[in-house]
Amino acid sequence: MSRSLDHLCPRFQPMAFELLARCAARRVWCIVVDTLRTKEEQAELLRTGASRTLNSLHLPQTWCRVCGHAGGLSHAMDAAPIADLNETNVVKAIQWDQRHVAWKIYGEEAKKLHLVWGGDWHWDFSHVQMPSTAYELTTRVA
């Protein structure tokens, strides 16, 4: 599994950076948990219940219908708020309680950028993905 924003579609990457910056501006610091996955990693996440599909946008996309890139980049990112910046163990510092206000802020900022937010599905709060249409990309809020 990759956590690199370099593994995101060229059209999605600046949106992901902007999301993280907007959250930080609202004093919600996030850590990137996942960008690009292999088919085997996705199958394991499905097996353990951490995902509900084998057809994830975290998998290498062979072609992007929006920007035209080819080359196996991700159209999705998982990020999570950090609960305590003084915590030495980052995994323990991640705020996984979905009732925490940080998740509401993360979702609000994602939707302002017209990203699809997994919290609207009521279970995948860390997930954001590219908008599904070119229209959504051209009408996003600056």
Image (cartoon, helix red, strand yellow):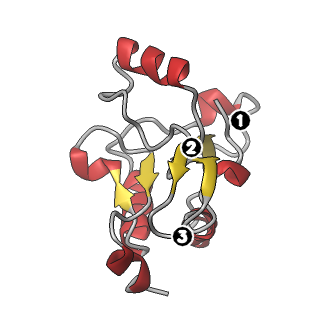
User: Residue 5 shows which numbered tag?
Assistant: none
Q: Name the residue under label 1.
A: 87
How far apart are labels 3 and 1 at the CA level? 39 Å
Q: Residue furthest right?
A: 88
The amino acid type of the residue labelled 2 equals Ala
Pair 3/1: label in front: 3
Q: Do the residues labelled 2 and 1 touch (CB within 8 Å)?
A: yes
Q: Name the residue under label 2.
A: 83
Q: Where is residue 115 in the image (x, y as percent from the top left)?
A: 40, 65
Residue density around tag 1, few if under 14, some if 14–19, many if 20 or more, within 10 Å: few
Instruction: Give the mark nearer the N terminus: 2 vs 3.
Output: 3
Residue density around tag 3, few if under 14, some if 14–19, many if 20 or more, within 10 Å: few
Which image quadrant is residue 138 in? bottom left
Residue at image location 47% in from the left, 24% down from the top: 42
Q: Name the residue under label 3.
A: 67
How far apart are labels 2 and 3 at the CA level? 35 Å
Residue at image location 37% in from the left, 34% down from the top: 55
Pair 2/3: label in front: 3
How far apart are labels 2 and 1 at the CA level? 8 Å
Which image quadrant is residue 13 in? bottom right
The amino acid type of the residue labelled 1 equals Glu
| Residue 51 vs residue 42, the one in the foreground | 42
Q: Position of residue 82 (x, y in %)?
A: 59, 45
33 over 54 or under it: above or below: below
Q: Position of residue 100 (x, y in %)?
A: 38, 47
Q: Can residue 79 be seen in this view?
A: no
Q: Is mark 3 on a helix, strand or loop?
A: loop
Residue at image location 33% in from the left, 48% down from the top: 118
Residue 20 relative to residue 109: left or right: right
| Residue 108 vs residue 67, the one in the foreground | 67
Q: Is mark 2 on a helix, strand or loop?
A: loop
Q: Quadrant of the N terminus?
A: top right
